[in-house]
Amino acid sequence: MKAIRYHRYGSPDQLQMQEIPIPVPKDDEVLVKVHAASINSWDWDLLLGKPFLVRLIGGLRKPRCPVLGADVAGTVEVVGKNVRDFRPGDEVFGDIAESGFGGFAEYVVAKGKLLARKSPAMSFTQAAALPQAGLLALQGLRHFGPVQPGQRILLNGAGGGVGTLALQYAKSIGAEVTCVDLASKFDMLRGLGADHCIDYTVADYTRTGQQYDKVLDVIAHRSVADYKRALRPGGTFSMIGGSMGWLLFQMMVLSKLISAGSGRKLGIMGYRPNREDLDLLSHLFETGQLQAVIDREYPLAETADAFRYFGTGKVKGKIVIAVT
């Protein structure tokens, strides 16, 4: 089968199409013929091998998973003997990172528990854009308690995969949403329902004097004190991604001290791939409350170009790789 592989950390130039054997599923796995996959920030970090902490997951000296790609949508080909939920021919989607990535290939194996049936209302392209970003959006907004109608929500990094889905989910509940990103993404964000937009190159959202009930930050890099200042009494700050250094330490240690004395809660959001939330994404899509925002689609052979565009930071929503 054809797959996009890399053997050392570096730029998208390391990504090469190669012929490799079709993987064989274990007893708790299924073999999926991949129709589409999408790029996430974890793929980018694992390609670069930066920040260094990602190598604790991806391999210290060279990549442990030579085929990237966590989000996939495709058709079940072979079912392991212990898998009861799927059969050949089922159309599925999911985040397969826990099974070792591998989505940028014609076939991939994944644990059955990581997949859900794709809604007939979705194309494979749309389905591939939803799993990881969608689950992070849902779970991030539920961190420290569910979103309530009328709450003031701020999304930092709102124009990417997670932000565009979190925006739509929060608006479906009736929240007032402020989006922080580049001004070039504002028209798209307003079209998805954003109430307010802040250009991060012009203003620091933690110093505008505005306070929020929930802040969901995809690219956090400021201090815990800054984030506390942006929260209303009883407000919450959830970090999805960003700095892996001093801020990570602050979130793990100092945030508990601040939370205890101020009534505000700050922390790192835990992420749990699961079928229940994938099914919820399907339901929200079918009922028109959620749409997959896809900036560009590339064929498998042009995956390196897709990563180059991802690295510009100008992507609106997701980039999808059309595999078959």
Image (cartoon, grey):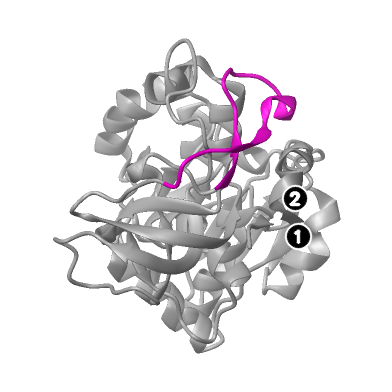
Q: Which residue is mark 1?
A: 295
Residue 278 covered by magenta stretch: no
Q: How far across and how far down the image is residue 188, in percent?
A: 77, 66
Tell which residue pokes out farthest to the left in this image. Answer: 82
Residue at the limit of the structure toward the top, as seen here: 61
Labelled pair 2, 1 in contact (Cβ < 8 Å): yes
| 135 relative to 265, above or below | below
Considering the image in quadrants, where does the C terminus appear? bottom right
With respect to residue 193, does 107 lie above or below? Answer: above
Q: Residue at x 69, y 50 (%)?
A: 300
What is the magenta range?
1-22
Looking at the rendered structure, the kind of residue marked 1 is: Asp
Tag of residue 315: 2
* Cα–Cα gap, marks 2 and 1: 6 Å
Question: Is residue 250 depicted above or below 114 in this figure?
Answer: above
Instruction: Say whether residue 134 is visible.
Output: no
Label number found at residue 324: none
Quadrant housing residue 100: top left
The amino acid marked with disc number 2 is: Val
Which secondary structure, mark 1?
strand
Circle 2 Cα neighbour tier, 10 Å, few/some/many (<14 / 14–19 / ≥20) = some
